[in-house]
Image (tube, helix red, strand yellow):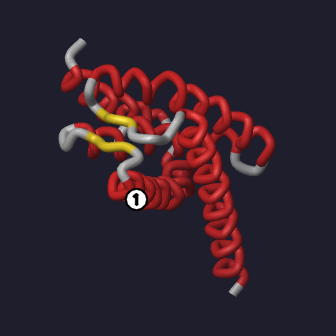
Amino acid sequence: MSPHLLLWILLIVPVLFLFLMKKEDLKRFMPVTLFAAVTSGIIYEIGIMAGFWYFREIAFPFVMYGAPAAATIWVFRFTYGRFGLYLVTNAIIDLVFAFIVVPWFNRMGLIGLGTWSGLIIYLINLGHACLLYGYQMWQESSKTIVNKE
């Protein structure tokens, strides 16, 4: 499979699955999904500037806004309110990403790795997942405060 075709599939197919989600759930978890995209972009940029990894120009938007965004919203849909389940789910997804997906993308030439190992990428992603959960908790508490007023 060509890298370009793979990137298009990773962008379009996960987004199409969002049409299966209830509109209320989509609205509820869209802010954390957008926050995830922004903070992921910051993490990716810091890594690029520090020489830890690089993305071929064509890969960057596909990697940022396709499958990761859809996965974020679906994981929150099924696990929010149960932090243990959320953490285990993210630990498994991040493990697959760091030790299977990233090396595969590296072999395809879509990304390159500098001095960082899969373990460091895994820990960054797991920390990022905890940040996202905290953000969603803040969003939920903000809605409660607004509704009480």
Residue 149: image x %, image y %? 69, 87
The mark tally for this picture is 1
**Amino acid type, residue under disc 1 in the picture:** Ile
| Left or right, 63 with reference to 83 | left
Residue 10: image x %, image y %? 34, 29
The N terminus lies in quadrant: top left
- Which residue does the image show at 57% across and 45% down from the upper left? 125
Residue 130: image x %, image y %? 67, 54
- Which residue does the image show at 57% across and 42% down from the upper left? 120
- Which residue does the image show at 45% across and 41% down from the upper left? 115
Image height of 77 relative to 109, above or below: below
Residue at the outermost front position: 115
| Left or right, 116 with reference to 44 | right
The one nearer the camera, 133 or 128, is 128
SS for callout 1: helix
Task: Indicate the quadrant where residue 46 lies.
Answer: bottom left
- Which residue does the image show at 39% across and 21% down from the upper left? 104
| Left or right, 29 with reference to 65 | right
Residue 20: image x %, image y %? 47, 33
Task: Indicate the quadrant where residue 77 lies.
Answer: top right
Q: Which residue is mark 1?
A: 46
Image height of 131 relative to 98, above or below: below
The one nearer the camera, 91 or 15, is 91
Image height of 128 relative to 97, above or below: below
Q: How busy is the neighbourhood of tag 1: few (under 14 within 10 Å), some, or many (20 plus)?
A: few
